[in-house]
């Protein structure tokens, strides 16, 4: 039943996009971001814990996945992508404290 509901929600979302036809690209990006967040949360908080239902820690598995995901997002925000060769050099000449903290945490984790 859960899978049928998930498949139906994908078709309903596709029909909604076709029906409203958003002309503003920002609204379409917002809709795609919401859809991705919805699918990530359903997967992490409902489907993955069901896989590990026999394990005592199975209920917490999805939470751990989300904590890891948001930790990675925070580290990317702090380091600004410098660890992968993507840097923005047009900023002020001050000491990039957030960058250094992000790189240290990225290397540690």
Image (cartoon, rainbow, N blue to C red):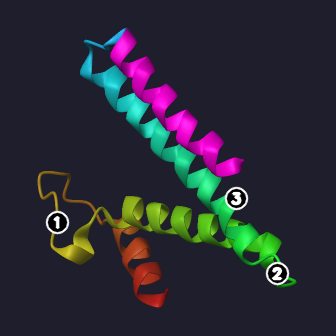
Check disc 3: other Cα within 10 Å, few if <14, some if 14-19, many if 20+.
Answer: some
Residue 91 locus on image (x, y percent): 18, 51
Which element is circle 1 on? loop
Foreground label between 3 and 1: 3
Asked if disc 3 and disc 1 are in contact, CB closer than 8 Å, the reply is no
Residue position for label 3: 45
Residue position for label 1: 86
CA–CA distance in space, label 3 to label 2: 13 Å
Residue 3 in the magenta stretch? The answer is: yes
Secondary structure mostly seen in the magenta stretch: helix
| Mark earlier in primary sequence (1, 2) | 2
CA–CA distance in space, label 3 to label 1: 33 Å
Please report the residue visible at 12 percent of the width from the left and 51 percent of the height from the top: 90
| Residue at the outermost left position | 90
Residue 18 in the magenta stretch? The answer is: yes
Which element is circle 3 on? helix
Please report the residue visible at 15 percent of the width from the left and 73 percent of the height from the top: 85
Q: Relative to 108, does residue 22 appear above or below in the rendering? A: above
Residue 7 locus on image (x, y percent): 54, 42
The region drawn magenta spans 1-19
Residue 62 locus on image (x, y percent): 68, 67
Residue position for label 2: 57
Q: Relative to 40, does residue 51 appear above or below in the rendering? A: below
| Mark earlier in primary sequence (3, 2) | 3
Please report the residue visible at 27 percent of the width from the left and 66 percent of the height from the top: 81
Q: Nearer the viewer, residue 89 or 50?
A: 50
């Amino acid at each position: 039943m859960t899978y049928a509901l998930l498949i139906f929600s994908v078709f309903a979302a596709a029909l909604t996009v076709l029906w409203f036809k958003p002309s503003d690209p920002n609204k379409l990006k917002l809709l795609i971001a919401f859809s991705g967040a919805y699918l990530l949360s359903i997967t992490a908080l409902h489907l993955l814990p069901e896989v590990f239902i026999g394990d005592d820690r199975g209920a917490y598995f999805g939470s751990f996945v989300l904590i890891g995901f948001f930790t990675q997002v925070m580290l990317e925000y702090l380091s600004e992508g410098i660890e992968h060769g993507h840097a923005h050099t047009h900023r002020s000449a001050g000491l990039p404290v957030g960058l250094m903290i992000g790189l240290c945490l990225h290397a540690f984790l």
